[in-house]
Image (cartoon, helix red, strand yellow):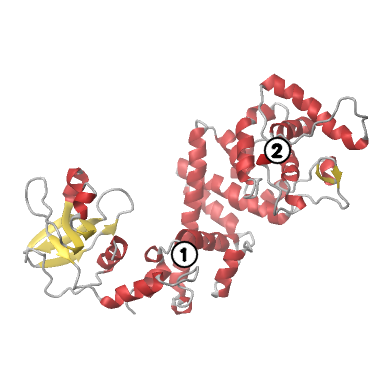
Amino acid sequence: MNEEILSFIWRFQYFEMSGLQTDEGQLLSVVRPGLKNANAGPDFSGSRVTIAGVNWAGSVEIHTKSSDWFQHLHESDNAYETVILHVVWENDKPVYRKDGSLLPTLTLKGLVHLSVIERYNKLIGETDEIPCSKSFDQVSKIHKLAMLDRSLLDRLYRKGSLVIDLLNENNQDWEETSYQWLTQHFGFKLNDPAFLRLSQILPLKTILKHRDNLLQVEALLFGCAGLIPEIKPDLEITEESAYPRELRREFQFLAAKYQLSQMQHHEWKLMRLRPAGFPTIRLAQLAVLISKSNGLFSTFTGTKDVSQLHQLLNLHQSEYWQTHFLFGKKSKTKVPFMGKDASNLLIINAAVPLLVAYSKQRQQPELLDKAMKWLSEIHAENNQITRKWEVLGMKVKTAADSQALIERYNGYCTQKQCLKCSVGMSLIRSR
């Protein structure tokens, strides 16, 4: 037994209600169980009960054992003075309020409908990555849609909070935050940490001073990334060595001027990457984006529709990087430009969270609606997680669907948080 299932039982009143009494022998009637509290304080707020004919309004606290009240130090927390009923599985120690009065206690052991506990234990005991997979077809469409809606909002707010955290680190500078957040996602997961670090050692205001010169923007990015190769001064200048030599010369001047530091080459990862996704190619494409954008923040939050974002992210890297994946190694085939799949990922993971964060900070819900509209206009991601849901019959058509299902899988299914999921709750509740 744990507090999670006890809270579920109390919330839906899955216990014998007739002749209900407190452990002190007083008649008890539950008028309203209250609302589950997601923040600090008692577990349920807005509860109403009648004890021995007296109406009480306040909070309800849930514990496996009544002695947990003291384990959690509630006796010294004034927030718990509002508790009108202590609901436990086992009453092993009486609890008194600060005024010396006994806190009424309801012990659920022996009162709970065992079928609920059996269904709960069966569900969380499943070894499948999605615990409800064997019973998923028994769940109504409305519960599945509710799962999608809740999961999508969970994901948007969670990612938006990460942007807000970054914004706070940048002293509320939205432009610098947008630059760091967007640059991070040019790493496409594997190189996210390296790209974020690059954006933090190379300030946007420094790059913008040279925005009209693409070569200098590239020199700043590749130089601070520590990727420009060493070239001996006495080495003969060839067509192959001219570009990296010019980059190094520009970077040496700019690094001295702005006192810039460099990353180490080993911070960048190439394993498990297709050549078109190498950090060198992504840096070259990022350089183009910065050079042609009048402001990353306004561009990504002010754009009206996804088609405009696709046009913006149709990035054609400079000539050298159209024939090279790495410095000094000419490709046998032409290097592709930023593809639609990659631009979609940038919209999903970078542009949308920026918009959500701005919506939250400025309290403009219409921006959240726009972010969700963008996701509904982009094709769904195709990965291992979305394919698992498709096997269960879920239709994954748009990025809104795939983002919701990825969040549900990572945040609920793998953590076996079935009691917080509309699908899991529908399977555990009596049928």
The quadrant of the rendering that contains the C terminus is bottom left
Residue 420 percent location from the top left of the image? 38, 63
Residue assigned mark 2: 265
Q: Nearer the viewer, mark 1 or mark 2?
A: 2
- Sequence-first disc among 1 and 2: 2
Question: Does residue 124 appear left or right of residue 341 in this picture?
Answer: left
Q: Is residue 97 above or below residue 12?
A: above
The quadrant of the rendering that contains the N terminus is bottom left
Question: Does residue 137 appear left or right of residue 113 in this picture?
Answer: right
Residue in the picture at 55% in, 44% down: 354
| The image quarter in which residue 241 lies | top right
Q: Which mark is residue 413?
A: 1
Q: Is residue 262 above or below residue 395?
A: above
| The image quarter in which residue 220 lies | top right
Three-letter amino acid code at disc 2?
His
Residue 111 visible somewhere in the drawing: yes
* Between 171 and 410, the one nearer to me in the picture: 410
Alpha-carbon span between mark 1 and mark 2: 38 Å
Residue 109 percent location from the top left of the image? 20, 70
The answer to whether mark 1 and mark 2 are in CB contact below 8 A is no
Question: Does residue 103 appear left or right of residue 245 in this picture?
Answer: left
Residue 376 percent location from the top left of the image? 58, 60
Q: Residues within 10 Å of mark 1 (few under 14, many from 20)?
A: many
Residue 247 percent location from the top left of the image? 80, 31
Residue in the picture at 44% in, 66% down: 146
Three-letter amino acid code at disc 1?
Cys
Q: Residues within 10 Å of mark 2 (few under 14, many from 20)?
A: few
Q: Secondary structure at mark 2?
A: helix
Q: Is residue 408 above or below residue 423?
A: above
